[in-house]
């Protein structure tokens, strides 16, 4: 199934040129290199709708990559910026996120390749396993690792700490949405989203895919008279017409627009969360087909 999804993601992506989107720097004061305020964050589109991230320590000129599925684009970006890539942070094992790990490890023998301890055996080229609430330093920047299972059982989100934190949350949280419950339940997703609720509302959300327009359309279908959602959808559509990313958002914005995060915040039941996600899974024709395939696969999967 992962290979099928990766094939869909890769359609039409081979000829796409390197694009690098600069994220506006964090405004809070802080020591250069110590956290989010000392880092420059670059967004690099990959495949059909993925985002890779390069986090550069401005003081040391070292960098950390998040989910660099396209190894060539990532290496080209590092060369263009004259920075040394020292670590790869993998949010989960799916090949549209981890597919560049092996090539990067081969090109950079000292590279540290990181994954969550429960996904590490399925993730290419891993040299370090991290656990929930583990704090780590890469490229002179401090990260907090958060276990956020459900999309996969070992999904890890990485929080770049500082006064204006950056959350690299892969396929757990999206702008106005969340990931499919592929290896977890509604209760698992509620627990993972609840971890994000404890973060500062200024936290910037850097997710794995450009799904914002579709997510806002679904959110608006749940609340057709919500003026804020209409405005956010219009803004997102305009950005996409200009081929600009809709990411990052902030936790404060997600608490206004994200039906899954808001449901978790209100203490919804497991059944309510399950119905909410099922509605999103079947909101489009393609989504319905994917859901049907997953349902069939789950039916024939042996217990355990």
Image (cartoon, grey):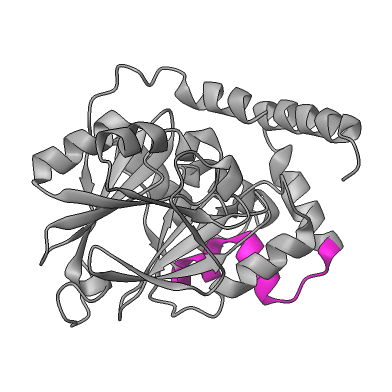
Q: Is residue 211 above or below residue 222?
A: above
Residue 244 position by quadrant? top left
The percent position of residue 248, horizontal first and vertical second, equals: 36, 57
Q: Is residue 104 above or below residue 170?
A: above
Residue at image x 71%, y 66%?
Answer: 190
Residue at image x 48%, y 78%?
Answer: 199
The quadrant of the rendering that contains the N terminus is top right
Magenta stretch, main secondary structure class: helix
For this view, does 129 lie left or right of residue 286? Answer: left
* Residue 69 visible in the shown view: no
Q: Is residue 153 above or below residue 252?
A: above
For this view, does 284 lie left or right of residue 235? Answer: right
Residue at image x 89%, y 36%?
Answer: 302
Residue at image x 48%, y 47%?
Answer: 212
Residue 19 position by quadrant? top left
The percent position of residue 220, horizontal first and vertical second, equals: 61, 52
The percent position of residue 229, horizontal first and vertical second, equals: 52, 57
For this view, does 218 lie left or right of residue 279? Answer: left
Span of residues in magenta: 251-270
The quadrant of the rendering that contains the C terminus is top right
The percent position of residue 216, horizontal first and vertical second, equals: 54, 50
Q: Is residue 154 above or below residue 30?
A: above
Q: Is residue 253 magenta?
A: yes
Q: How many marks?
A: 0
């Amino acid at each position: 199934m992962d290979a099928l999804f990766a094939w869909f993601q890769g359609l039409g992506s081979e000829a796409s040129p390197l694009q690098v989107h600069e994220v506006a720097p964090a405004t809070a004061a802080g020591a250069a290199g110590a956290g989010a305020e000392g880092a420059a964050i670059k967004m690099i589109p990959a495949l059909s709708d993925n985002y890779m991230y390069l986090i550069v320590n401005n003081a040391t000129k070292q960098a950390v990559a998040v989910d660099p599925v396209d190894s060539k684009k990532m290496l080209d970006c590092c060369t263009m910026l004259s920075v040394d890539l020292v670590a790869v942070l993998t949010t989960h094992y799916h090949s549209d996120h981890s597919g560049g790990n092996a090539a990067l490890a081969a090109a950079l023998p000292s590279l540290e390749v990181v994954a969550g301890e429960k996904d590490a055996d399925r993730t290419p080229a891993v040299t370090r396993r991290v656990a929930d609430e583990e704090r780590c330093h890469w490229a002179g920047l401090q990260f907090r690792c958060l276990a956020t299972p459900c999309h996969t059982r070992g999904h890890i989100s990485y929080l770049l700490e500082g006064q204006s934190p950056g959350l690299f949350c892969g396929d757990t949280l999206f702008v106005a949405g969340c990931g499919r419950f592929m290896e977890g339940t509604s209760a698992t997703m509620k627990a993972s989203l609840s971890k994000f609720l404890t973060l500062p509302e200024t936290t910037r959300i850097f997710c794995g895919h450009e799904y914002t327009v579709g997510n806002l359309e679904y959110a608006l279908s749940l609340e057709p008279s919500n003026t804020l959602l209409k405005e956010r959808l219009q803004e997102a559509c305009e950005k996409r017409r200009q081929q600009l990313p809709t990411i990052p958002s902030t936790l404060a914005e997600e608490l206004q627009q994200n039906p899954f995060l808001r449901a978790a915040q209100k203490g919804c039941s497991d059944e309510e969360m399950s119905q909410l996600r099922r509605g999103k899974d079947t909101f489009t024709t393609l989504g319905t087909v994917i859901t049907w395939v997953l349902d069939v696969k789950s039916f024939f999967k042996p217990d355990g």
